[in-house]
Image (cartoon, rainbow, N blue to C red):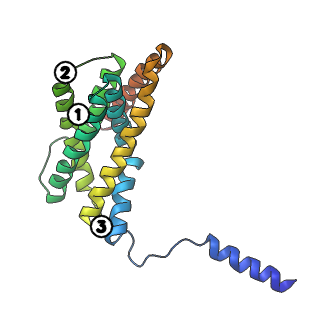
C-alpha cells in the first residue's frame, strides 16, 4: 500500500512540475512567447486592437478585413523602429489615444472612407509597434518576437470582428456602440494614468 502511495505521489509531482528552462525566454520559442504575450497582457493594447476589428466589422467589407491587415503590417514597421532604437515621441499617449479615438468612432457610428480609416489605424499602429519593439527582451529572438506579437494582434482583431457581428441586429448595434464607449473610457483612463 505504501509503495502505491509513494508511486502516485511521485507521478503527481512530476505531472505538476513545470518545464525547466536554462535561459528564460531565450531563443526562438522564448522570443515568440514574449511577443505573443505582450499585446495580450497589456490592457491598453487589448482594447485598441479589439477596437480595430470592431470598427472594421462595423464599417463592413472591405474594411472588415483591410483594417486588421493594415494594423499588424504597420505595427511590425513600428516594432522595427523600436528595436533599432529610433525614437517616436509620446508612444504611451499615442497608445491611449488610439483607444479613445477608435472607441469614439465606434460609439458615434462614424463611417469614414476606407483610405481615411486605414490612415487612422496605421498611425496608431506605429505607436503600438514601437512599444512592442522597445520592450523586446534582451534574450529574445527579434524575428520570433515580431511574429508572436503580430499573431496575437491578429487574434485580438478577430475578437473585435466577431463582436462586431452583433451589429447585424438592432440590439447588437447598440451593444457594439456601447462597447465603443467602453473602449473610449478605458483609453481615457489610460491617458489620465499617464499624467
Horizontal and vertical percent position of residue 22: 41, 79
Answer left or right for 126 relative to 64: left
Mark pair 3, 2: CA separation: 39 Å
Q: Which residue is mark 2?
A: 113
Residue at 11%, 53% in the rendered image: 86
User: Between residues 86 and 102, which one lies in front from this camera angle?
Assistant: 102
Tell me if residue 192 can be seen.
no
**Residue 174: where, in percent of width, then height?**
45, 16
Q: Are marks 3 and 1 in contact (CB under 8 Å)?
A: no
Q: Residues within 10 Å of mark 3 (few under 14, many from 20)?
A: many
Task: Categorize mark 1 by other alpha carbons within 10 Å: few (<14), some (14-19), many (20+).
Answer: many
82 in relation to 98, above or below: below
In terms of image quadrants, where is residue 183?
Answer: top left
- Viewer-nearest of labels 3 and 2? 2
The residue under label 3 is 140
**Residue at 33% over, 16% down:** 109
Specify whether 125 is left or right of 6. left
- What secondary structure is marked by label 2? loop
In this view, which residue lies farthest toward the front?
A: 61
N-terminal label among 1 and 2: 2
Q: Residue at x 39, y 71 (%)?
A: 24
| Quadrant of the rendering where the C terminus is positioned | top left
Q: For mark 1, what is the residue?
A: 121
- Position of 119 with respect to 54 (left or right) is left
Whether tag 1 and tag 2 are in contact, CB under 8 A, the answer is no
Which residue is painted at 38% across and 76% down in the image? 23
26 shown above or below 93: below
Examine the image and state in which quarter residue 14 appears: bottom right
Amino acid at each position: 500500500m505504501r509503495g502505491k502511495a509513494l508511486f502516485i505521489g511521485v507521478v503527481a509531482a512530476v505531472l505538476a512540475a513545470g518545464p525547466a528552462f536554462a535561459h528564460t525566454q531565450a531563443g526562438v520559442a522564448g522570443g515568440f512567447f514574449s511577443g505573443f504575450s505582450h499585446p495580450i497582457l497589456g490592457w491598453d493594447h487589448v482594447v485598441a486592437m479589439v477596437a480595430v476589428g470592431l470598427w472594421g466589422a462595423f464599417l463592413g467589407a472591405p474594411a472588415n478585413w483591410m483594417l486588421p491587415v493594415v494594423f499588424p503590417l504597420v505595427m511590425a514597421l513600428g516594432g522595427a523602429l523600436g528595436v533599432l532604437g529610433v525614437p517616436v515621441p509620446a508612444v504611451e499617449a499615442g497608445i491611449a489615444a488610439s483607444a479613445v479615438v477608435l472607441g469614439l468612432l465606434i460609439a458615434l457610428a462614424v463611417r469614414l472612407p476606407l483610405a481615411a480609416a486605414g490612415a487612422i489605424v496605421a498611425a496608431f499602429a506605429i505607436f503600438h509597434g514601437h512599444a512592442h519593439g522597445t520592450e523586446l527582451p534582451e534574450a529574445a529572438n527579434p524575428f520570433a518576437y515580431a511574429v508572436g506579437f503580430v499573431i496575437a494582434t491578429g487574434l485580438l482583431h478577430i475578437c473585435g470582428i466577431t463582436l462586431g457581428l452583433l451589429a447585424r441586429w438592432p440590439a447588437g448595434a447598440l451593444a457594439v456602440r456601447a462597447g465603443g464607449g467602453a473602449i473610449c473610457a478605458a483609453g481615457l483612463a489610460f491617458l489620465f494614468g499617464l499624467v
